[in-house]
Image (spheres, rainbow, N blue to C red):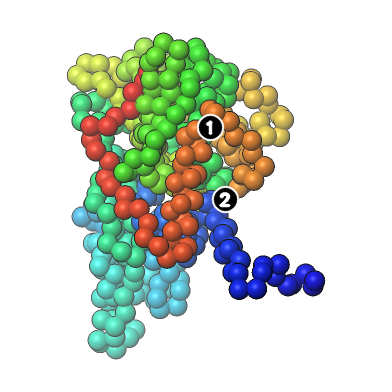
Amino acid sequence: MRPTESRASPGVQSPPERLEIDIATTRPGTPGGIFMRQFWHAVYRTQDLPIGHVRPIRIMSEDYALYRGQSGAPLVVAYRCPHRGAPLHLGGVEDDAIRCVYHGWKFDNSGQCVHQPAEEAGFARKVSLRTFPTREYLGLVFAYFGEREPPSFPHFPHRQSEGLIQVWNHEHVPCNYLQSFENSMDEVHVAFAHQPGGSHVKLSADLPIITAEETAWGMLRFGTRRTGKVRQTLHYAPNITRVIVPPLAGMDGVGGWSEIYFSFTPVDDENHLWLITSHVEVTGKDAEAYRAKRAEYDSKFAAAPLVMDVVRDIWSGKVRFADVTHPDLAIVQDIAVQAGQGRIEDRANERLGRSDAGIILWRKILTRELLAIAEGRPAKKWETPPAEVVPTLGF
């Protein structure tokens, strides 16, 4: 029998080959890219986008321009001018419009071309620029890149009790977004990766049993300890984790543990952004004390090396992992490990165990959804998370 001949009996069809699904890619046109473009994505910090400024951004392997008009509203538009393809972030903002630096073509906030200095009257109305729904929430700029109508916004709730919203530093992490999202599902790693420096010492007292369940909006993960107490963490589809975390080192005297909203936004398949905000439950004089302490903290560490510079020193062996000191120590530790897995982790050669229950479940969900998209079948209709389901600390 030649190698190309079928071994099936006459009249018996061989079972169809199962499609290979790449759960890590978010490139346009792929099942993963189509899936991810069903959702809003955090793309920038509000504080980093002044009125009248334009920024280039790259999200899910595509380039865009982000600007803030004089009205204060942010807008994401196509990266290149439709005239000759010049990058629009080189241009300027006029009222709520953007003007290309190359030949002066101007586009209003609907994307309509409204001025072409060297062209015939009437030509401008035939030209438009693609725009993308853009909103702000919890100190971050969010955008929607899908073909259909965007889901409702805000797409996830925040804690309603009084307190301070703190926007964290913005990190560009050199690995696939799924590695960091999966790490946020791994509660056991904190007892080891964060042991140097003791940032999570209370969570390291005993190792929890991890379980997880799918929800209408993503996944709930539970870490049950010997005492019976349960730490509940929320993972909003497709890339947001809501969890309670310890205060920064040196900040534990004010504010206590805070609730964070952690967005892992793909830049491309080998890079992603960490865009994080936290809710610190302090009010009145306690809030004033927290702000003062935070200002003192930031001033003290203003000259600290960049997170990625420290990470590279760890990777090169210049600094031992256990010896690192840094104001953002937990972030340094996490990125060193997660990006240290490689730009795109080799999942085919892993050996997952009981503690990986959340990761295993999310991969099953993601594979199921991407397979449905690849085969043209109906996929899950994701719901906006309910406000009453909140994370718990559990110790």
Nearer to the camera, 158 or 132: 158
Above or below, 120 against 316 in this view is below
Residue designated by label 1: 356
Earlier sequence position, callout 2 versus callout 1: 2
Return the mark for residue 270: 2
Residue 253 vs residue 13: left or right?
Answer: left
Find residue 56 and report its horizontal and vertical position in percent: 43, 57
Alpha-carbon neighbours of circle 2 within 10 Å: few (<14), some, or many (≥20)?
many
The amino acid type found where label 1 is placed reads Asp
Q: Residue at x 45, y 12 (%)?
A: 226
Return the mark for residue 111: none
Nearer to the camera, 165 or 221: 221
Q: Residue at x 64, y 39 (%)?
A: 350
Q: Quadrant of the C terminus?
A: top left
When asked about the image quadrant of residue 35, the answer is bottom left
When asked about the image quadrant of residue 392, the answer is top left
Q: Secondary structure at mark 1?
A: helix
